[in-house]
């Protein structure tokens, strides 16, 4: 015992003492501020319970959207479409984009305020705009959208005071969202546009085909390229024949010149036979004549006398004929036989034939030249018509290709429309809006528990703030820590006459100390 203090244990754990003192100080502070703690905690709990009782019941409807890449988006371009049928994985960006579209004004406004989207801007008053914004804010607070973790599913929830209203609101939201998605993925009116363009190009293609057919019939053309090829072939053949004809004419001219020269140097006839001997033919003729004259003299003697003039003349003729017969029988004449020279005759024949051949070849050349000129004129006309024909043919080809292109796009648009009508899109309703008659809120038990926890927390916070703002000493430990003297004893407050102590601590009237503490000089520190 030292200075009235008994020290029984000089060694102790400072950490345990500090922890015990902190816990004790907290409990003491809680007891000191029990009214404040009870008031704050009770008020919060009361507010929570009253709010749970007075708040109207809320019913929740839930639906789910599935984002997928089962169908490719066809790009509307004037070029030919090359669709890719390879389905890719859905990215987080796509899901977030669909979430933004789902919460956009184009989707939410018609659902939150039906008929607002059809109201012209000129008729919208400030009061109507404020009312619309209020409805939109209320709808946005009741709407919950979030993607389901590690999936391509978007979960949509809506709270309302009536279960039918909650489900109907989600159904309208689903219809508006899918329609907006359809409009954004593919422009509206594409099918009608491609149908009208296909019909227009069909008419222009038919007109261009008729113009081409009329042009062919007017100019007797069925295939201009084939016709030009035929004409070029005929011209080539005619030019070859013309060159051959000119070569033949030159050859014939050379032959005629040589034949003419040889005719001038060659004799036309040649001796074929030389023969000498009596002229039997003359002797025979004279003998016959003598006999005839004698027979005539005999006939005359029947009528005339020998000395008659006619008889004497006939005798003279007989005598002269006999003399001539004797001379013919005695003479030996030379008989020379000639004939046409065969070589000259052959040359002359060749010359004549050459002239005939040259005239024929010249006539043939003239025909070839005329035919060649006509073919060249026809080819020139074909070449002049080539530009018009090619233009018409190009128009037919271009309009046919345009018609086929827009017909293909028309069919694709009609298929896309049919797929849209049947709900075959990249965003589909995985779960229709639910209808639940069990209220989703307010949850009275949960709210009471939360209110109690919140009240306890706020009560403790109020006690802490009250203790932090206190400037008085309430416990011996505080006095021991505030003064440099140890606490010797504590006395409880009792109903006794007032005694004036030599050393007392002045207390505030509203915060009286529970006991009177006496202090003296601090003993030496035994822990050291």
Image: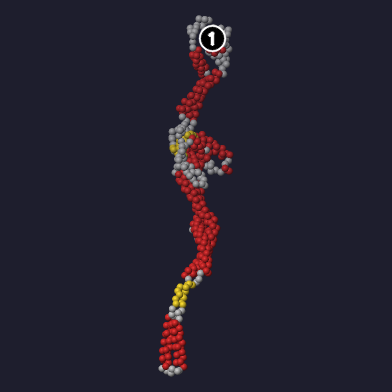
User: x, y (%) of residue 519?
Assistant: 55, 8
| Quadrant in which residue 437 is drawn | top left
Name the foreground residue: 428 vs 217: 217
On screen, residue 226 above or below 278: above
Extreme-front residue of the structure = 330
> Can you identify the residue that label 1 sits on?
487
Describe the colour scheme in one phrase: secondary structure
| Quadrant in which residue 284 is drawn | bottom left
On screen, residue 197 above or below 328: above
Name the foreground residue: 384 vs 62: 384
- At horizontal 42% and vertical 91% (from top left) the residue drawn is 297
- At horizontal 43% and vertical 78% (from top left) the residue drawn is 277
Name the foreground residue: 426 vs 484: 426
Whether residue 480 is visible here, answered yes or no, is yes
Whether residue 192 is visible here, answered yes or no, is no
User: x, y (%) of residue 187?
Assistant: 51, 44
């Amino acid at each position: 015992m030292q200075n009235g203090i008994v020290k029984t244990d000089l060694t102790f754990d400072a950490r345990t003492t500090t922890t015990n003192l902190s816990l004790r100080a907290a409990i003491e502070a809680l007891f000191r501020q029990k009214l404040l703690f009870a008031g704050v905690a009770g008020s919060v709990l009361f507010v929570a319970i009253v709010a749970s009782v007075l708040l109207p019941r809320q019913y929740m409807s839930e639906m789910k959207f599935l984002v997928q890449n089962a169908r490719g988006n066809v790009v509307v371009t004037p070029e030919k479409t090359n669709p890719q049928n390879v389905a890719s994985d859905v990215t987080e960006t796509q899901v977030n984009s669909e979430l933004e579209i789902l919460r956009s004004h184009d989707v939410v406004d018609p659902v939150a305020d039906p008929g607002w989207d059809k109201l012209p801007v000129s008729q919208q008053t400030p009061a109507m705009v404020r009312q619309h914004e209020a409805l939109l804010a209320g709808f946005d607070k009741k709407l919950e959208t979030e993607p389901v973790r590690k999936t391509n599913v978007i979960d949509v929830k809506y709270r309302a005071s009536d279960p039918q209203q909650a489900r109907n609101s989600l159904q309208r939201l689903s219809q508006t969202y899918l329609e907006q998605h359809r409009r954004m993925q593919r422009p509206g009116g594409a099918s009608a546009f491609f149908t009208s363009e296909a019909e227009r190009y069909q008419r222009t293609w038919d007109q261009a085909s008729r113009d081409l057919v009329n042009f062919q019939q007017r100019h007797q053309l069925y295939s201009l390229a084939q016709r030009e090829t035929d004409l070029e072939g005929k011209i080539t053949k005619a030019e070859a024949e013309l060159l051959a004809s000119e070569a033949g004419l030159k050859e014939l001219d050379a032959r005629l010149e040589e034949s003419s020269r040889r005719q001038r140097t060659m004799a036309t006839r040649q001796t074929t036979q030389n023969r000498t001997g009596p002229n039997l033919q003359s002797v025979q003729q004279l003998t016959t004549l003598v006999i005839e004259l004698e027979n005539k003299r005999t006939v005359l003697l029947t009528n005339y006398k020998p000395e008659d003039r006619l008889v004497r003349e006939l005798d003279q003729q007989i005598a002269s004929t006999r003399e001539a017969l004797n001379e013919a029988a005695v003479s030996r004449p030379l008989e020379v036989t000639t004939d046409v020279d065969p070589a000259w005759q052959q040359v002359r024949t060749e010359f004549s034939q050459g002239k005939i051949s040259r005239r024929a070849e010249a006539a043939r050349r003239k025909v070839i030249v005329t035919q060649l000129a006509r073919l060249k004129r026809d080819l020139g006309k074909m070449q002049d018509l080539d530009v018009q024909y090619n233009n018409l043919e190009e128009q037919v080809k271009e309009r046919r290709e345009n018609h086929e292109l827009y017909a293909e796009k028309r069919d694709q648009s009609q298929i896309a429309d049919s797929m849209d009508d049947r709900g075959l899109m990249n965003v589909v309703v995985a779960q229709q809006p639910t209808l639940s008659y069990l209220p989703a809120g307010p949850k009275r038990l949960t709210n009471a528990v939360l209110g109690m926890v919140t009240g306890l927390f706020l009560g403790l916070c109020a006690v802490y703030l009250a203790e932090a703002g206190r400037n008085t000493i309430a416990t011996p430990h505080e006095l021991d820590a505030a003064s440099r003297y140890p606490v010797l004893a504590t006395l409880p407050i009792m109903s006794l006459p007032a005694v004036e102590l030599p050393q007392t601590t002045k207390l505030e009237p509203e915060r009286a100390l529970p006991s009177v503490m006496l202090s003296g000089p601090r003993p030496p520190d035994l822990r050291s």
